[in-house]
Image: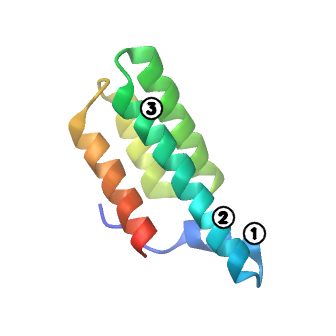
């Protein structure tokens, strides 16, 4: 899943207004928060921990209108703890967003 600029960047831009430093700070905070949830997903060994991390990731994505990430969080919710395919797709999304 390739990252596409869209609602997420628009949400960050609306929050930051004309302040490019604030935009960059908000963007970095989003990346760090999503990365923390990805780390929790990677370390989850039981259904409850996996579900909680996936729900937090979905909530974060929803609050910033990051639909591709919400879809990936839904995949995680539907999958088994430690699913390497969904973990890779989430990491790819974050890497592409960070590089954009």
| Alpha carbon separation for disc pair 1 and 3 | 27 Å
Q: Residue at x 75, y 73 (%)?
A: 16
For label 3, the SS is helix
Q: Residue at x 37, y 27 (%)?
A: 43
| Alpha carbon separation for disc pair 1 and 2 | 8 Å
For label 2, the SS is helix
Disc 3: CA contacts within 10 A as few (<14), some (14-19) or many (>=20):
some
User: Where residue 2 sits in the image (x, y, percent)?
Assistant: 31, 66
Q: Quadrant of the C terminus?
A: bottom left
Label 1–label 2 contact, CB within 8 A: yes
Point out the tag, 1 or 3, that comes first from the N-terminus: 1
Find disc 1 in the rendering and name its residue: 15
**Up/down of 10 relative to 70, above or below:** below
Give the side of residue 92 with respect to residue 23, left or right: left
Find disc 3 in the rendering and name its residue: 40
Q: Quadrant of the N terminus?
A: bottom left
Q: Nearer the viewer, mark 1 or mark 2?
A: 2
**Up/down of 76 relative to 32, above or below:** above
Label 1–label 3 contact, CB within 8 A: no
* Residue 85 picture quarter: top left
User: Where residue 88 sits in the image (x, y, percent)?
Assistant: 26, 47
Numbered badge on residue 26: 2
Give the side of residue 20 with respect to residue 84, left or right: right
Q: Residue at x 53, y 33 (%)?
A: 55
Disc 2: CA contacts within 10 A as few (<14), some (14-19) or many (>=20):
some
């Amino acid at each position: 899943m390739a990252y596409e600029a869209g609602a997420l960047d628009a949400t960050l831009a609306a929050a930051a207004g004309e302040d490019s430093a604030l935009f960059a700070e908000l963007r970095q905070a989003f990346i760090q928060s999503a990365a923390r949830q990805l780390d929790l997903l990677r370390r989850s060994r039981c259904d409850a921990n996996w579900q909680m991390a996936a729900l937090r990731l979905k909530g974060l994505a929803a609050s910033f209108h990051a639909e591709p990430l919400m879809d990936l969080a839904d995949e995680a919710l539907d999958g088994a703890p430690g699913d390497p395919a969904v973990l890779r797709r989430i990491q790819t999304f974050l890497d592409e967003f960070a590089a954009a």
